[in-house]
Image (tube, rainbow, N blue to C red):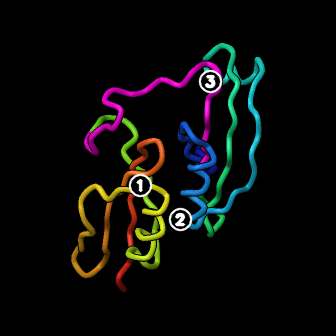
Amino acid sequence: MAIQRMDNVAIVVDDLDAAIAFFTELGMALEGRAEIEGSWADQAVGLAGIRSEIAMLRTPDGHGRLELTVYHSPAPVTAEPAVPAPNTLGLHRVMFAVDDIDDTLARLRAHGAELLGEVARYQDAYRLCYLRGPAGIVVALAEQLN
């Protein structure tokens, strides 16, 4: 028995509208939003009294999905430190392939994105960078050169 696919990556945010704006500016499409609550949610997640809202976004190729979640109850918990370093254990980053890294950075900066280092060149294959997006999410961008 094997997995069928990776369905989505879920990220908890504090401002759902701002996160949707950021990721749609990146080029993802909003599939929909939904209120999540009830005993089934409590059982699946392992928290009591869940009341949240999610937004599901999909990549242009239709194969990748990102679930953004804002928790109304129980209150979200802030990680320590609030803005972890890129080498912190756990989920590291989400990477997206883009056709123009400079244009993408310029558009995302209008949504609060902050470059963590600088745009680097890996051989003659890629230009790469890490940036911090909404709720401190580390997003990596890769522009293939050939």
Report crowding for label 2: few under 14, some 14 to 19, many 20 or more residues within 10 A (C-alpha).
some
The kind of residue on which mark 3 rests is Val
- Judging by the rendered image, the residue that carries numbered circle 3 is 45
Instruction: Give the foreground label among 3 and 1.
Output: 1
Q: Which mark is residue 77?
A: none
The amino acid sitting under disc 1 is: Val
> Which element carries disc 3, helix, strand or loop?
helix
Q: Which residue is mark 2?
A: 26
The residues tagged by marks 3 and 1 sit, at their Cα atoms, a distance apart of 25 Å
Figure check: 21 above or below 17: below
Tag 2 and tag 1, C-beta contact below 8 Å: yes
Image position of 85 (left or right of 25): left
**Which contiguous range is marked in magenta?**
65-87
**Residue named by callout 1:** 139
Picture layout, residue 2 above or below residue 58: above
Q: Is residue 21 magenta?
A: no
The answer to whether residue 78 is magenta is yes
- Residue drawn at the location 31% of the way across and 68% of the way down: 128
Label 1 SS: strand
